[in-house]
Amino acid sequence: MVEEVKLLKTWSSPFGLRPIWVLKLKCIQYESIDEDLSNKSALLLQLNPIYKKIPILVYNGKPISESLVILEYLDQTWTQNPIMPQHPLEKARQRFWAKFNDEKLLPSIWSVFTKEGKQREESMEELVENLKLAEEELQGKRFFRGDKIGVADLAFGWLANLMSVFEQVTGFKVIDGKFLLLSTWI
């Protein structure tokens, strides 16, 4: 049976980049379908009727939604170049840091980007604190997983891809010189 793998994504979403990176790490051939989120396609709405957002992985006609769920599915389906460690404690740590990124770090950077005045200053303080925590987690390690790329690295991957854009647009230099381990990781 020929495997059919499709990925619905958009160029601007850090969530859509995650499955792309795993598909490439695992050398999985796939069809890329770019979505216009301001005019969602019938296919996107059919495949993800609950959240109506990307990314969506379609494997042999079956849709899988939510980027971190997709990553775990890919890792369990294609076992070459694993992105999750075998040990349950290490798996839990990878999930924790991926969740930290999605629920703490990303919202704090979005607040800096969208707020003004005093609210922006407060958001910037929260962002710096969140980056300090991520920096501490990297102590003595090349990647969040240690010596191999893991789910947490993929969740934080937007830093390498989009942070420079953020810094250019806002005029804030967030990482440069302040977070040496994150700079090295990037």
Image (tube, rainbow, N blue to C red):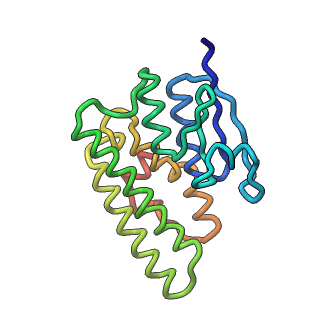
**Residue furthest toward the bottom?**
118
Lateral position of residue 78 relative to residue 162, left or right: left
**What is the quadrant of the N terminus in the image?**
top right
The x and y percentages for residue 29 are 62, 23
Residue 125 vs residue 82, the one in the foreground: 82
Above or below: residue 161 compared with residue 171: above
Lateral position of residue 13 relative to residue 102, left or right: right
Residue 171 vs residue 146, the one in the foreground: 146
The x and y percentages for residue 44 are 69, 46
Q: Residue visible at 33% across and 62% down? A: 132
Residue 92 vs residue 46, the one in the foreground: 46
The x and y percentages for residue 109 are 50, 67
**Residue furthest toward the top?**
1
Q: Residue visible at 54% across and 39% down? A: 64
Where, by quadrant of the figure, is residue 80 drawn?
Answer: top left
Q: Residue visible at 38% across and 54% down? A: 99
The x and y percentages for residue 112 are 52, 73
Lateral position of residue 146 relative to residue 156, left or right: left
Q: Residue visible at 58% across and 32% down? A: 62
- Tally of numbered discs: 0
